[in-house]
Image: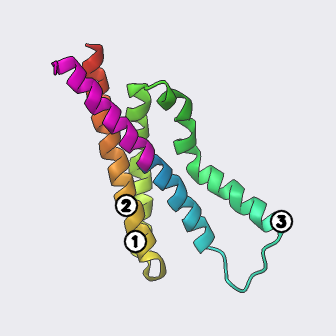
Amino acid sequence: MSTQSSFQHNATRALTLMWVFWASQLTLLGMSQLAEVAPSQPLSVGYVVAGLLFWAFKALPLLIAIPWLLKRSHKAASWLAYACLFYFITWMLVAFTPERAQLGALGALSSTGLFVSCMLFTRWEKRIQI
């Protein structure tokens, strides 16, 4: 196997992992949003719409990168890695709240995985272009 095809294979694996961690971040953000709902509070349409809009606002940095990630842009992956650091900080703050510690720990692990996979994809994809 040549070096170039090795980098191609590694970049494809990193891209796959990046998509998995990206989807887990969106899912965990949704679970975090649902965890903020009081159990005794009735769900109205306005409340659900407001929750979805707030989730979309929190997920906006992840959602903005979609078109460029679909094109395998290493620059978009590196920017996503930097944006992921803000999610890591947020998840660490959530991890230290007693009632949502598990969710925060999962989010911190997911954002760490997203960061590492973005950086590895950026490195290997850039090596392919050289």
Q: Which residue is mark 2?
A: 108
From this view, report whether residue 15 is shown above or below residue 74: below
Residue 65, horizontal then vertical, whole percent: 52, 35
Residue 16, horizontal then vertical, whole percent: 39, 39
Q: Which residues are magenta?
A: 1-20
Residue 22, horizontal then vertical, whole percent: 46, 47
Q: Amino acid at mark 2?
A: Ala
**Residue 43 in which image quadrant:** bottom right
The mark tally for this picture is 3
Q: Secondary structure at mark 3?
A: helix
Residues at badges 2 and 1 in contact (C-beta under 8 Å)? Answer: yes
**In this view, which residue lies farthest toward the right?**
45
Identify the disc placed on residue 36: none
Residue 122, horizontal then vertical, whole percent: 32, 30
Taking the magenta stretch, the answer to whether it contains residue 11 is yes
Q: Which residue is mark 1?
A: 95
Q: Secondary structure at mark 2?
A: helix
**In this view, which residue lies farthest toward the top?**
130
